[in-house]
Amino acid sequence: MVNETKYDVVVVGTGVVGCLIAEQALDAGLSVLMLEAGPKVDRQTIVENFRNLPPSLRHHWDAPFPPPPWAPVLETRTPGEENAYLDLTGPNATAYQQGYVRYAGGATWHWAGICWRMTPEDLKLKSLYGVGRDWAFDYETLEPYYARAEYALGVCGPTDAALQWPPKTPRSRPYPMGPLPLGPGEQRFTDVMAPLGLQNLPAPQARNSGVSYDGRPACCGNNNCFPVCPIAAKYDAATALPRIEAKGGKLLTNAVAYRIEADDRHKIQAVHYYDPHRTSHRVTGRAFVIACNGIETPKLLLLSKDDRHPNGIANSSDQVGRNMMDQPKLKATVEMSEPLWTGVGPVQGSSILNTSQGDFRSEYAGAMFRMENMARGSIGAAEALKKGLYGRALDQEIRRLSACTGLLVVEHEPLPSSINRLTLSDKKDWLGLNRPRIYYDVGDYVRRSAEQYTIPTLKKMAAALGATKFDLNPEFLHSDHIMGGCIMGKDPSDSVVDVDCRSHDHENLFLPGGAAMTTGGSGNSTITMAALALKAADAIVAQFKTA
Amino acid sequence: MRISRSTSPRIGRRELLLGMSSLSALFCVQATRAATLSGGALRSGVVHQKFMSVSSLLVPHKLNETIGIRTADAMIATVPDFPEHLEQLASFIEAKKPADVEELMEALPDVSLKNAAQSIIESWYTGAVQGASTISVISYEEALMFKVTSDVMTIPSYAISGPNGWTADAPPLSQLPIF
Amino acid sequence: MQSWHNSRRLDLMIQRSFFYTVTVCSLAVIALSATHPAKADPLGNPQRGQYLAVASDCVACHTAPHGQPFAGGLAMHTPLGVIYSTNITPSLSAGIGHYSLEDFDKAVRRGVRKDGANLYPAMPYTAYSYLTDQDIADLYAYFQKEVAPVDKKGPVTALPFPMNIRFSMSFWNMLFLNGKPYQADATKSAEWNRGAYLVQGATHCGTCHTHRGFLMQEDLAHPLSGASLGTWYAPNITPDTVSGIGSWSDQDLTEYLRTGRLHGKAQAGGGMGEAVEHSFSRMSSGDLNAISVYLRSLKPVSDPNDHTSSRFQQGHDVSPAVELRGATPIMDHNDDTASGAALFMGNCASCHGASAQGSKDGYYPSLWHNSVTGASRGDNLISTILYGVSRSVEGRQAFMPGFGGKSGDAVQLDDSQIARLSNFVFKTYGRSDVQVTPQDVALIRKGGPASPLLLLSRVGMAAGAILLLVLCAVVFATRRHKARNIV
């Protein structure tokens, strides 16, 4: 059926990046086909999946999204699922067991909605600090796209300029909505951190604050942003899909793209996909957008190698799959004599960012600190029950542990490194496609930061909170901010895409999103991905106009 | 945990079974509502009554009867020796008439009975029954673990208030809500 | 969102208004009516006029989405075509700057433009005909002196033949247009008279809440006893304790009008939400009290189908979760047969609570003890699910998203899902004898049932246009007799 139609724009992936580009293209009058590897599942099903989970799995953000066999993921719940896809190596392999969702709507289903912009300095690591790379453009180029992305997603944030990030950097537009209130835990955390010089800022969040936005309701503090916002007060790309379809966009689910086809002149002609019956289909188009984020996008490019492109599509630089980044995360549980009461409001509502900037970045990584704002009732109950308590003592202990414990988190800024590399594994997935094999080492830049800077800071923070227990998990974990596999740059010999996320090798192939990010900074990557998506969308529409 | 797969696309039966068995080895949610007892309705009625009666001493909260019945059914189906332990607990309570759970737990003579009592308590608080090799989910919204903090926080996924209606104020730690 | 709701309400009103018009065209029933000139203080008081413009809700229709106040241009979709509201700012080129008081009076109370053409009854001049001369002068003063002129003409209404013959409106006017301003009843208190004046005139409650007869005239024997608007149902607001709002206190009623909600009883959705937002919430407490006094003095109208308890007392808190948890597998696809209980848990409970008890602060209402679920028909529950609620009072928004009434809604429920969900909600939390079918939902999604009268008038449109003058002559002589026979 679709084989017959040639679409203006074929978008692979229905996450935030794919949906933003699809909608921009539709608004410009272009025809759009979207391919999604996984199923389209209604919010009500996912919400009820969450509530029907065994208690231990309710803290596993992928658990309400069981992967169908043809769309497996890296972060798994069971050995069975692990054996189906996982192939991670290197000294910090588990720090790349990224959580993402191969459902229509993508990983924004279970993102926290946090929208920290990168700073002007974050884009100039090489020239300012002599590490990493410089971006191909400066902050002023990106700023208007940040603003547009904030309006496209519906971001709430502080109106007070002193509380906005990046500091002392002009914004072209205010946040579309004012800030959300802080609950007792985050307020106390903010107050206690301030004397240490650690400024806990109210986070800009793609969550409706006080009023509806785009027909979606205001946040009512369900404290369930991950794994799923039950009421769509948080932006997720699934909320855009009905609008995209209403505008004439065509959505194909359970369609696993496995080959990008280029012609003799390196122009992309088609994408091939498998349906769940393992039948292959081919769709043609004029422009192609691979919006599958930092793991599935490079994997698809590598899978698409042919005689003329022996290293894979878009890979004349041999940079596809290299520079895999994420913010390596450390977690510490603290217990205090005084109550904190996290869990009132969204699961994340504030972070310390001033720790991410400074001249020390020539030596070690900057970092973002945060206290998670998850309701800890079920965690407290599990601990109290383990102690064999009952009766009133049990109730009191659950209450105490819920109130007087907290989770401190630090996420380190990564550097792009060619050794952190995604290649094709010899192992095959359910469809017979090579799995992604990822080598990952957080690197000395991050390790030095942890030793000299962030772990000592975590301890200081715990002490200031009056912690009676400080339990640091020394293992680096994943932050689910997949970046770098199709790195952006001006020089086609050492980068994959240009300033508009267009492949250096193929004029009608766009690889926007996390994979294109040149560096990662310390904050969450989504709003930068969204800004890059809008920039790419402008370039795509402009390309059609001049054609 | 049962995973329901879409049936329209043809998944290899072998793969599906493999996936299912590895899942169910860890988590198997029983559809306890459908579970019928071998002893028939009369016997199950008696067991349910005993379970509720024992539970009302073990747990100082208001207990939902439907959840009690489903919990008892799940325990009968998945917890070894549960009917015997329940019987013994009921008899002990009948004989000694302890005033509350504290007195009962102090007085219980053997560890296996204490463990049985503790697992009943745990199921009410977590909303799940831990069987020999399975976990049965019985409740979420009614799980008692959420009641003790209900004055401060919401049960995740449920509204705490209207938009932006929450504040940084919290009641004293010592002030347990009234159940 | 807001503008869409506005136009939606207007659509309903206009759709009803059109029934009058087309009926007159097709059936050519004619009546005579006296006219009278305006006799008022020509200076008027703009402050009082502004208040009256609020009470009359002029801004709702005469402002386009994101447009300037009173500059018109709002598109109102009717079964017969799009009507655009006009610019009523004092612009000389685009608005009513060149209107004299008499011109203004003729437009507002008689439905006739300065150039002599009839207005379509989208403009509720039938209700405004009750306004006093002084109020007209005040309104005129407000529009001429206080409203900023906008020199921009909106789109021109161009309805298909024969609806483009505006003159046809005058027949209906002769039959149904009230001839004189409100006449005070000396036997009643000043407060009662003020309430009667507002209810019959400016706030035009009967436009929605009074059932219509075959000729779509208001059923004046049973005023305000409830009427269908196609999608929403404007309920019985007579003081009957079971079928109406007789169980409400004066304070209940004024609180509802002021805020759009009454805890544990009712909340304003659809057109009533807009009326509260634009009009009632901005009126003086004295006027709200007067409205309450008048409404509570009306003849109670009882619906024989109602039980012994009111629509505010149905249902109780019970959670379907105690049965559902763990009994449903974790799914990687949608369950097309999901029960109403499961649909409730997945779509409604996150805000309204697992037992539909509402939020502690009352922002999200309980679904039991709620006029929507306690109603004897499904219209308002279906409409609420499809179109949601959006109402802003004193800077605070009351909002519920629509679940598929618009193609871009983030969550899309289909007719069958909404029917199952509605039946569960009625059975568990409301009036358990109410049944909703997917066809009921489809009908409301379409905008409500097509009236047989509309069909008749459409069929009669062509013939009626040709035969209009002939029929007029014939019917004029035997109009009463003829009308009865046709009915």
Image: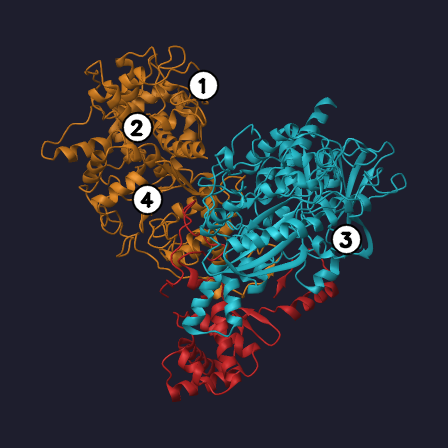
State the residue lying farthest toward the bottom: B95
**At which x and y percent is residue C314?**
32, 56
Chain letter belonging to callout 3: A
Q: Colour of chain A?
A: cyan
State if disc 1 and disc 3 touch (CB < 8 Å).
no
Q: Nearer the viewer, mark 3 or mark 1?
A: 3
Choose mark 4 or mark 1, whichever is in front: 4
The chain ID associated with circle 4 is C
Where does label 1 land, which residue?
C156
Label 2 to label 1, Cα distance in Å?
A: 25 Å
Q: Which residue is mark 2?
A: C54
Whether marks 4 and 2 lie on the same chain: yes
Mark 3–mark 2 CB contact (< 8 Å): no
Please identify the quadrant where the C terminus of chain C is shown.
Answer: top left
Q: What colour denotes chain C? A: orange
C396 versus B67 height, above or below: above
Name the outermost residue toward the right.
A307
Position of residue C381 relative to residue C141, above or below, is: below
| Residue drawn at point x = 30 percent, y = 25 percent | C53
Q: Colour of chain B?
A: red
Task: Check residue C261 in the rendering and tell me which mark sits there, or answer none.
Answer: 4
Residue that carries the numbered disc 3 in the rendered image = A278
Cα distance in 3D space between marks 3 and 1: 57 Å
Q: Chain of mark 2?
A: C
x, y (%) of residue C364? 39, 49
